[in-house]
């Protein structure tokens, strides 16, 4: 379980650091694995609008392979800065929605934490299911908008999936 979380963090960090465009519009199968609405247990930044953005293809394929299809994506844009978004996703707000913040919560993309990007990591456990949530905010210098990218990952250990579904242990829920 920890390996998958660490791998996801590395892939997302690589995407943020190496891409001159955090996300790009991709044709064809960009919708595979995405959702139509932000999940009800994830607070939405005021004024954010759903956007037709996708994580770069190579990073998306790496994440899907590592997570074995257990990840969903959605993207938004907002006029708020990345630091305003970071300030919105406070530990208190996310705890009230059932999420546990990572040790650092939301962090900026520079040592001073006031750069044009931010990354937030959260997790939750509900009814035998474990999930991770990554929120990435990246300002687009051309449009003066901030791109918000949400990735929700099922990180439930395989042995829990089997027993929770009534598999090998025979305990149906």
Image: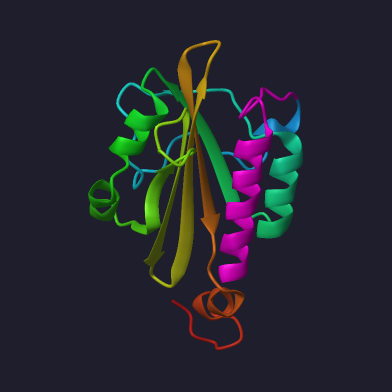
Picture residue at 23% right of the left edge, 52% below the top: 96
Left or right of 16: which side holds 138?
left
Q: Check the picture and name the quadrant holding the C terminus.
A: bottom left
Residue 19, x across and y down, in percent: 67, 31
Q: Indicate the position of residue 40 as horizontal and vertical percent values.
A: 35, 43
Residue 159: x %, y % from top left: 58, 80
User: Toward the viewer: 18 or 51?
Assistant: 18
- Magenta stretch in the rendered image: 1-27
Q: Is residue 173 left or right of residue 93?
A: right
Q: Tell me, what colour scheme is on the image?
A: rainbow
Image mark count: 0
Q: Quadrant of residue 58?
A: top right
Note whether 94 is above or below 170 in the view shown.
Answer: above
Q: Is residue 119 visible?
A: yes
Above/below status of 27 relative to 133: above
Q: Nearer the viewer, residue 5 or 41?
A: 5
**Which residue is farthest bottom?**
169
């Amino acid at each position: 379980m920890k390996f998958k979380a660490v791998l996801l963090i590395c892939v997302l960090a690589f995407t943020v650091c190496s891409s001159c465009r955090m996300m790009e519009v991709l044709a064809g199968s960009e919708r595979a694995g995405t959702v139509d609405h932000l999940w009800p247990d994830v607070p939405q930044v005021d004024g954010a609008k759903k956007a037709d953005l996708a994580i770069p293809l190579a990073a998306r394929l790496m994440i899907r392979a590592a997570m074995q299809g257990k990840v969903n994506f959605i993207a938004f844009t907002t006029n708020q800065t990345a630091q305003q978004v970071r300030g919105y996703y406070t530990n208190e707000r996310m705890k009230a929605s059932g999420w546990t913040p990572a040790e650092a919560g939301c962090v900026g993309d520079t040592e001073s934490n006031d750069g044009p990007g931010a990354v937030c990591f959260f997790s939750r456990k509900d009814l035998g299911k474990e999930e991770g949530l990554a929120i990435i905010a990246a300002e687009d210098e051309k449009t003066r908008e901030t791109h918000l990218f949400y990735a929700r990952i099922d990180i439930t250990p395989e042995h829990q999936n089997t027993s929770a579904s009534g598999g090998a242990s025979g305990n149906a829920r």
